[in-house]
Amino acid sequence: RDDQIILDPFLGSGTTGAVSVMHGRKFAGCDMRQSQVDLSARRLEKTIQDMEDAAEEAYKPIFEMCEPLPEAYGMFKEE
C-alpha cells in the first residue's frame, strides 16, 4: 500500500531504498557501516534527481521544422 514504510535493516548500496522511492513509497534503512549509509544516501539523492529530470523532460514541448506538404495534396494552395 502507498502509506506503508519500507524498512531495510541491511542498507548496503541502497537498492531497496531506490526502488521504494521510484514507486512512491516511504523508506527507512540502517546499516552497521557508515560507509554503506553514505553510499546509500548518495544513491537515493541521484535517484530522486534522475526522477525529477525525467519528469521535466517528459513535459518539454517538442518543436520541429516540417517540410510543407506538396501541392499535390491539395491542402494548401497559394493564391
Image (spheres, rainbow, N blue to C red):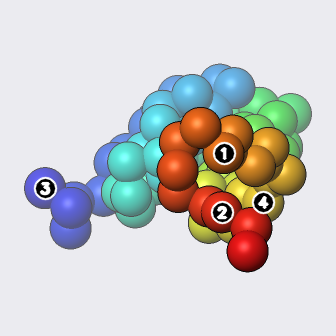
Disc 3 target residue:
1
- Asked whether 1 or 67 is in front, the reply is 67
Query: Mark 1 Cα within 10 Å, few/some/many (few <14, many 20+)?
Result: few
Residue at image coords 36%, 57%? 25
Question: Element at badge 2?
Answer: loop
Q: Position of residue 17 (x, y in %)?
A: 52, 42
Name the residue nearer the viewer: 55 or 12.
Answer: 55
Q: Which mark is residue 63?
A: 4
Residue 54 in picture, x, y percent from top left: 67, 52
The numbered dot on residue 8 is none
Q: How far apart are the alpha carbons under marks 2 and 1?
A: 7 Å
Q: Secondary structure at mark 3?
A: loop
User: In the rendered image, which residue does mark 1 sit on?
Assistant: 71
User: Real-space Cα distance between discs 4 and 2?
Assistant: 24 Å
Q: Position of residue 34 (x, y in %)?
A: 82, 40
Q: Quadrant of the N terminus?
A: bottom left
Mark 1–mark 3 Cα distance, whole angstroms, equals 58 Å
**Upstream in sequence: badge 3 or badge 2:** 3
